[in-house]
Image (spheres, rainbow, N blue to C red):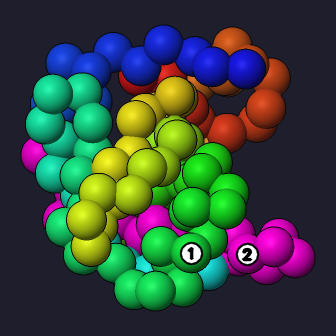
Amino acid sequence: MSVKVDIDRLADTLGDFAYAYLVTVDDDFHAHTVAVDPVLADGVLRIESVGNRTRRNASAHPDVTLVWPPREPGGYTLIVDGQAGIDGGGLQVRPAGAVLHRKAGPDSPAPASGCGDDCVPL
């Protein structure tokens, strides 16, 4: 299922993060994670250069996840699910869903989703 991502909100949010982890899977669905510096342009996250394993995984299994860790403890993590496509030596990821997520603390409001964590869809 695809959830429309507010690209303007995603663009504004990306300024709060330094780098991301790109998660792909191989044919046995083992995760492969690498640090990347995605740039949002024209509604697509562009990653300039990736290794052979990442490229091979994304070609075979284009559903990928990008995870931007919080800069400060207790901050939000930005998680973007999307569809990857090969772009020369890099990738393009078209966002399908995005959320700011963090573990709920004792002062966090009760989430509407009932998941027990503090989540903000973008």
Classify 10 as above or below 51: above
Circle 2: is it few (<14), some (14-19), or many (20+) Cα within 10 Å? some
Above or below, comparing residue 78 to residue 73 in the picture? above
Q: Is residue 20 left or right of residue 114?
A: left
In front of the other: label 2 or label 1?
Answer: 1
Q: Quadrant of residue 6?
A: top left
Q: Position of residue 16 (x, y in %)?
A: 17, 49
List the residue tagged with mark 2: 26
Say whether residue 47 is left or right of residue 61: left
Q: CA distance from mark 2 to mark 1?
A: 8 Å
Q: Which sits in the foreground, 84 or 1?
A: 84
Query: Which residue ends up furthest to the bottom in the rendered image?
Result: 52
Is 25 situated left or right of 55 in this image?
right
Q: Which is nearer the N-term, disc 2 or disc 1? A: 2
Q: Position of residue 95 (x, y in %)?
A: 43, 33
Q: Residue at x 50, y 77 (%)?
A: 54
Query: What's the amino acid at mark 1?
Result: Arg
C-beta proximity under 8 Å, tags 2 and 1: yes
Q: Is residue 78 visible?
A: no
Q: Amino acid at mark 2?
A: Asp
Tell me the quarter of the image containing the C terminus.
Answer: top left
Crowding at mark 1 (Cα within 10 Å: few <14, some 14-19, many 20+): some
* Stretch of the chain drawn in magenta: 14-31
**Which residue is depicted at the point 69% across and 13% down?**
112
- Relative to 18, say whether 34 is above or below: below
Q: Which mark is residue 56?
A: 1
Q: Secondary structure at mark 1?
A: helix
Of residues 105 and 117, the one nearer the viewer is 117
Q: Residue 65: x percent and y percent?
A: 54, 54
Question: Which label is found at residue 17?
Answer: none
Query: Residue 90: x percent and y percent?
Result: 29, 67
